[in-house]
Image (tube, helix red, strand yellow):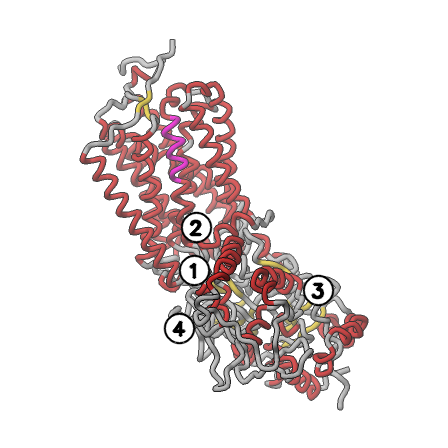
Amino acid sequence: MMRTLTLMAVGLLLALPLTIQASDLLPKVPLPAGKDKCVEPTDVMRREHMHFILHQRDETMHKGIRTTKHSLKECINCHNAPREDGKVAHIESKDHFCNSCHSYAAVTIDCFQCHADKPENTNYRHSLVENTLPHHPEMSGSALTKDTLNVLATKGDAK
Amino acid sequence: MKQLPTDPSRRNFLGKTAAAGLLIAPGVLLHQVAQARPADEAASSKVRWGMLVDTNTCSKGCDACVTACQTENGWGGEHSNEVKSSPEQQSQWIRKVTLRDKQNGHEQSLPLMCQHCETPPCVDVCPTGASMKRADGIVLVDKHICIGCRYCMMACPYKARSFVHEELHDQKPYAPRGKGTVESCTMCVHRVDKDGTPACVEACNKAGHQAMWFGDLNNPNSDISKRLKEYGGNQIRADLGLNTGVRYQGL
Amino acid sequence: MKKKITYTEIEGRSLGYYALLVVLGALVLLGAGAALYMEHNGHYVTGMSNQIVWGMPHVFAVFLIVAASGALNVASISSVFAKTAYKPMAPLSALLAISLLLGGLVILVLDLGHPDRLIVAMTFYNFKSIFAWNMILYNGFFVIVGVYLWFMLDRTMANYSKYAGFAAFFWRLTLTTGTGSIFGFIVARQGFDSAIMAPMFVVMSFAYGLAIFLLVLMATYSWRGAELGDGTVRRLKNLLGVFIAGAMYFVVVFHLTNLYMTKHHGVEAFTLRDGGIYTQLFWYGEILVGGVLPLILLYLPVTGKSRIAISFASILVILGGLAQMYVTIVGGQAYPLEMFPGKEIIASSFFDAGVKSYTPTLAEALLGIGGFAMALIMIPLALRILRFIPVSMADAEIDPHYREAK
Ligand code: SF4
């Protein structure tokens, strides 16, 4: 894991000088409409994203901390939101922001052996309003919680 | 509108942090039940989540809990993403079991899943620490460090764990699962963390059986504790002394 | 006065030598291919399932690991119990111990759901886990036996070899106890839950390890065309007989104690009477092939002196050992978990009722055999490079108390 991450960092750094000649081949990390920056500055993200994700992974997994700033799920929600035609990129495709960079830098990742490579709700459009963090698709219109509430309410379980 | 049907106990425990939560994430909490544990706060051992199954009301033909779990967590069912595995190899996080008493022939059915033991054998045996128990009593597999040795499956007295035998696609974002790792019921930890109820419990109630209950076992005022106090509840394989978080009535 | 023993490497130029390497190498390659195939596709290409979680690879792996510690016996007898007659064979015994353990571990690792995460297994330790302890035991075994070998082979260090021998002896007893405990600790399964599991594994390891050692020793000397004294063979085969009898004794005790405890009646009836393939493997494989027949072959005056018969008996012990592992590991899982005392499960979508079936596929069998072959191929390779064996094992050369047979 650490090795992969180091390789990842080295790969990205090596990739930088090439950017001048071949800008077409460059990896693309699309931002959603209405957003002009990620949760961290680009150069920080480029070097550190794996550490952010790794840290958050342990926090969420072991402690149940579910802040969204550095969560992989949020990366996906933002950067791999469905396009205008409603299609979403899969991890195998170069259009997927993770793969576009990682195949460029020749660094393999195994995140998506388990993790979903697209947002859950593919109708999901990213909020156009700035500063509405966290932007959880399942939170704002939460079907589950509403269900829970309804069921429990009609059952008279409420005290 | 009726009063919010949250366990009063949970409100007490979480009440003190709700104000802070409002400051951190106003956008969310406007839509959300205000008692949820804030996203940046770790699960606490003051709480012990548990479930109670009433085998008397659990209906024999019904598998609403199983279907709900499948939809929620993206395993099995009609659209199973395990297409190559044999039925014996496909994952099952929760299953329905029908029993017959050998003496009097009494038949009953119950859902069986990870029992979220207080002293889980899977956690004891796991060589890497991938099998783990959260502070609030939920037993999980950290698939990032699971090496797929399956020792935990050997050790589980309930056969509650499954191994993923093939490459998967289209997982649910909040229920990651993949080839070569072990998985089991998470007590819908992603929902519980947002003050929700496990999908199976919800589905059972929705189907009108009211055979499953979810709540904080540590709090004497929670519905589940009160019910347990009044009617009692057995552990499966109580002889092992695992102090399971899932209890059964009428067993 | 003690004679000085000269050690040698083997020539390793004969056609037979290369043929041996080719055969074993091919098996290793097949095993590697099988592992890649399993790793690439996932475990659905095996017969293992969520019902039978550990299968053929584990049968071979556990057998080899157990045998590894037993193979060290000869060395231990020479160093710990100061029996000079065993001393010339000590390096070969240590070498075999290392190679068998390596073969077993390779199988275990390649069967993991994530062999690529081996580094995780090495860096994240759960110290409560007997499995994690075993990883430490295995690594320590390599180091200690390695050092022991070095002290034995390096004249300047020879004085210390005795201490290294002691260390190796205790380490390997712990190691086998640990391996046995992997199963003994599984309280959930009626077939495993027994304190006798660990000592039983220790005694079985003596028999398996010595059987393999005897075969390797006899093969090495007959292929080299060098002399291997009758005294040595007789001593080893008698020892093997004792170990087999000891293992049989533990098997009997194991089943008797289980029969004594009412809660284990079900699983005993399963193994001893109603278990189908497992019952057959128990009686014909474990008891007949692995115990009774080799004992007869080793002790009957007609066959007891024939090296062919002794080799045959050793092979039988190995086969019986594999059968024993199969009955223990797979049979222990095939027997349904007893979750609801007094009740029977009449329906379940997850195969809770009735005996679970397991049909190993070619891939997993090849993985197991490949690991075995890998353990064996290391012997001829190592023998060619380093001086592990005495030039001659003639009785007069190695045994100070040797007298011509009456
Ligand atoms: S399969 Fe994974 S979770 Fe289970 S014991 Fe092995 S490493 Fe731990």
Name the element at disc 2. helix
Question: What residue does disc 3 label?
Answer: B42
Q: Are marks 4 and 2 in contact (CB under 8 Å)?
A: no
Task: For label 3, count other residues whose C-alpha is less than 10 Å away and answer few (under 14), some (14-19) or many (20+).
Answer: some
Asked whether disc 3 touches disc 4, contact meaning CB atoms under 8 Å apart, the reply is no
Work out whether residue C227 or residue C154 is closer to the camera in this orientation and state it. C154
Identify the element where label 1 is drawn.
loop
As drawn, A55 above or below C95: below
Q: Chain of mark 3?
A: B
Residue B139, visible in the rendered structure:
no
The amino acid on which the numbered mark 4 sits, given as a three-letter code, is: Val
Q: How busy is the neighbourhood of tag 1: few (under 14 within 10 Å), some, or many (20 plus)?
A: many
Q: Can you tell which mark lies on residue C260?
A: none
Camera-near label (1 vs 3) is 3
Task: Give x and y (percent) for residue C292.
Answer: 33, 39
The residue marked by circle 4 belongs to what chain? B
Q: CA distance from mark 2 to mark 1?
A: 18 Å
Mark 2 vs 1, N-terminal side = 1
Callout 2 and callout 1 share a chain: yes
- Rounded to the nearest whole Å, what is the CA distance between mark 1 and mark 4? 19 Å
Residue behind mark 1 = C52
Indicate the quadrant where residue B215 lies. Answer: bottom right
Mark drawn on residue B83: 4
Mark with earlier residue (3, 4): 3
Q: Residue drawn 59% across and 72% down?
A: A74
User: Magenta residues, as a range?
Assistant: C90-100
Residues C324 and B177: in front is B177
Q: Amino acid at mark 1?
A: Ile
